[in-house]
Every structure is written in structure tokens, then in C-alpha cells.
Image: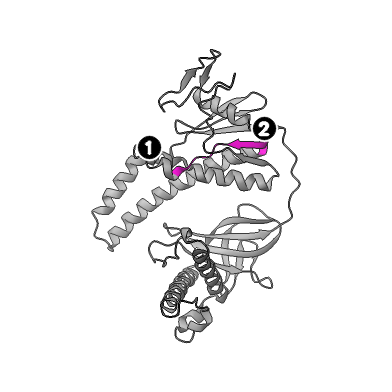
Amino acid sequence: MLKAYKFRLYPTDSQQVYFANCFGCVRFVYNKMLNDKIEHYKETKQMLKNTPAQYKEAFPFLKEVDSLALANTQQNLEKAYKNFFRDKSVGFPKFKSKHKSNASYTTNNQGGNIRIEGKKIKLPKIGFVRIRQHREFEGVIKSCTVSMSRTGKYFISILVEREVPEWVPAEHKIGIDLGLSDFAATTNDAGESVKHGNPRCLRKTEKQIKKAQRALSRKQKGSKNWEKARLVLAKKHEKIANQRKHFLHDLSNKLTDENQVLVIETLRSSNLMKNHRLAKSIADVSWFEFGRQLAYKAEWKGRTLIKADKFYPSSQICSACGHRDGKKALHIREWTCPACGATHDRDINASKNLLALAK
């Protein structure tokens, strides 16, 4: 089983310069190879087989960085390029921008050239870099990705091959209904219904974000004061993203630890965000990311994740008698079944109906 562990790096000034060179060379090679592929295809209508080694004589600065980082960039480009010709809907590869693309590069472990010793990690071409390893891991290091955030922080994601742990089966099944007023309503087969509050990470700091954005807009782009204001805004966005990830990881871990079968509704966020009144709130809850986390954690722990059909009317069916009462406006949070007279909380009722799909 492959699992990634992400840690904070604290490089020296000279090491930061090397990382910047790596980020730049990886971006340069990707763009150069993509441009040559495009020009070659225009002339011959065939795919060009080019490699980073072909450019090292013309651009000697490419020899100063990790060759494996350039090779991994080539693999990423080849995969994206072939995927486009296989399925046009995935989109054509885009050129990497210095200011918009993620600053990162990936290198592989060959002969133990990546290893952790004490409070430092050894990386190819650069040597030992200080690392904050906040948790231990077991297994063989396969590769690692060094990245820099918009706020100038450095991180390393270490991909480790480890044995699949033996997880003890959980005793419960659970239905999960996602929402906006509450992030999720859950009901398990023991009859326990719980509402998990929406943290509203963006909404709670929206005024601070707007103030920082106005301050940035008043500065001359490229000036020192503009860079200071940009950093202030970037830190606020980074904090919101970290708060959201922390909440999602906590909840997804809790649900996958306690339940053997999980049933979740399928929501198309892209379609729902066409409602401009709710778009910001929908983006803030990150339903897609939550579903992604549930999927891979369920696989790790030997759980079963069931995604209900997107047309399944979980909010329209009475969980007591099965009567289908039809669509309801979003402001209706409670309703009474006309067939059996049971009064339902909209979200809890939906979670009970999703639980009924558990096998």
C-alpha cells in the first residue's frame, strides 16, 4: 500500500535558492517540451517523443538541478498529452505559469538517496534539509515532492510503500446526508442521529478577507508594500484552507473508524454552484473533498463506501412508511408525512433513507 506523509521543511537561504531553481527548471522544461510537441504536431500531425536531456546542451542551467525532477516532469506531461488524445473532454495540457502554478518538484528514492536522519532529511543534489517530522511512519520511501506555498512555507510529501494494516471490522452502518445549514446529518443502524455543524471557515473571516483584498488593490503591483499586502492576504486564505482540511479530516476519520458501511449522497457541486446565491457557501463546505477523503480512508481501513444515485430522492421519502411526498423548497426544514403522520427533520430523515441503502 502506498501512503503519503506531509511534513514542514526549514531550508537554509542557499537551499531556498536551490529549491527556487528546481521549481523554475521544472516549469521551464514542461513548457518547452509542450511547446515543441505542439509545433511538431502542427507540422507532421504526429506526437513528438522529446526528453529533458535534449535541452541540457542548449540550456546548461538544467544540469544544476535534480535530473529525476526533470524526468518526472516529462512523465507528467506525457500522461497529460496522451490523455487528451484518448479523451478530448479531459482538456489539453496547459502551460505552467510562474505566478499561478504550484511551485513543486518530485524526485525518486534511488539507493537510499532520500532518507531521514534525526531532524533532517537527505535529498538528491542538496543534502540534508531540516524537517519537522511530527509523526513517525514505517515503510520504504519511494519518492518525495517538495513544494512551496503562496506564503513562502516549504513542505515535503513523502510517498511510502508499507504493508496493509489489519483493521478490525466496525459494528455499525451509517447514512450521511450533506447540507449547508449543518455540514452533515448522520444516522447509524443503532438509531443514533447526529448533526455535524458547518464550520463556515470562509464566512467567519470574510470581512477580514475583504479588508486585506482592498489593502492589496491600493498598492502598486510589484512594489514592496504590494508584496507585504499580498502575503497578508495569502496567509488568511491559507488559514481558512487549513481550518477546512482539519475539520474534514477529523470528521472523515471518525466516520470511517466507527462504521463498516457508509452511504453518502451524490452531489454535483459544479451544477449546484450555478445558483449564485448559494455558490460561495457550497464552495466553502467542500463536499467533493469530503467524499474523496471518505473514499480513500474507507479503502485503507477495509470499509465499504456506497454512493447513492444522484437522482435518489432521499429528502422526499418518509423514512417511517416509505411514502414519497415530492420535492420541497430549501427553506422547509421539517415536514409531516400525509400518509402516516410522522414529523421529520428534513436532514435526519434523508440520512435514515440513505442508511436503508446499506448492504
Query: Quick one: 128 or 176, which is closer to the camera?
Result: 176
Residue lying furthest bottom: 57
Image quadrant of residue 221? bottom left
* Position in image of residue 120 (x %, y %): 60, 64
Mark 2: give few (<14), some (14-19) or many (20+) Cα within 10 Å. Answer: many
Image quadrant of residue 151? bottom left
Q: Which numbered tag is attached to residue 2?
A: none
240 in the magenta segment: no
Measure the alpha-carbon separation of dots 2 and 1: 31 Å
Residue at 64 percent of width and 39 percent of height: 256
Residue at 30 percent of width and 44 percent of height: 210
Quickly name the residue at label 1: 278
Write the start and end of the magenta stretch as one range: 257-269
265 in the magenta segment: yes
Image quadrant of residue 229? bottom left
Quickly name the residue at label 2: 173
First reached walking from the N terminus: tag 2 or tag 1: 2
* Position in image of residue 230 (x %, y %): 33, 55
Query: Quick one: 229 or 96, which is closer to the camera?
Result: 96
Residue lying furthest front: 45
Tag 2 secondary structure: strand
Number of numbered labels in the structure image: 2
